[in-house]
Image (tube, rainbow, N blue to C red):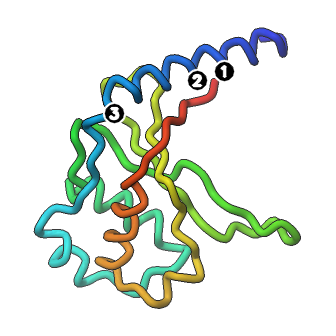
Amino acid sequence: MDLNAYYAEQKRRREVAEQEFAARADTWRFTLAPEAQDWAADWPAITEANLLQLVLQADAAGLFLTAEAGSVRSAYSYRDQYTEATTATGFGFWPETAEYLVVHAAQAIMYDELPGLDAFGVLRRVADTFQQPAAGYEQS
């Protein structure tokens, strides 16, 4: 694929994703299941090393309640401008019925806030980051 075709495809995917997002604008809700606190009780301290594992397993257990079927997983990260070390992970929601849409959380989970949270607190933070979601798309 030449560069012009690549950029044209990215533009098309972004436009489709924005339409998919707009069509669902009144349905975005991200909450935790009532059993999330009990489920998270046995987790060790959450660090940047096991944050993604916690979220993926919680999603697989059905603990993130969303308006439609899909999956929650890592979508973006923040990096230190000088060291390029990753400092946060942002999550996204991939609706099963969407062609290209990825619903991006409004905020990332900063690694320096993890020491003050237990596993349930981290799951609450992840759900909270989706309170003002934005449209994203899967790149080719």
For label 1, the residue is 10
* Amino acid type of the residue that numbered disc 1 sits on in the rendered structure: Gln
CA distance separating discs 1 and 3: 22 Å
Quadrant the N terminus occupies = top right
| Three-letter amino acid code of the residue under disc 2 | Arg
Label 3 residue SS: loop
Q: Nearer the viewer, residue 18 or 55?
A: 18
The residue that appears at 34% across and 44% down in the rendered structure is 71
Q: CA distance from mark 2 to mark 3?
A: 16 Å
Residue at label 3?
25
Residue shown at the point (36%, 63%) measured from the top left:
128
- Where residue 23 sits, quadrant-wise, is top left
121 to 102, vertically: above or below: below
Q: Which mark is residue 14?
A: 2
Three-letter amino acid code of the residue under disc 3:
Ala
Q: Residue at x 41, y 29 (%)?
A: 21
Residue 47: give x, y in percent of width and height: 51, 80
89 or 104, which is in the foreground?
104
Locate residue 98, reporting x and y percent.
37, 24
- Residue at the far right in the pictured view: 82
Please indicate whether residue 110 sits to the left or right of residue 1 in the image: left
Marks 2 and 1: in contact by CB < 8 Å? yes
Mark 2 or 3, closer to the camera:
3
**Quadrant of the image for the C terminus?**
top right
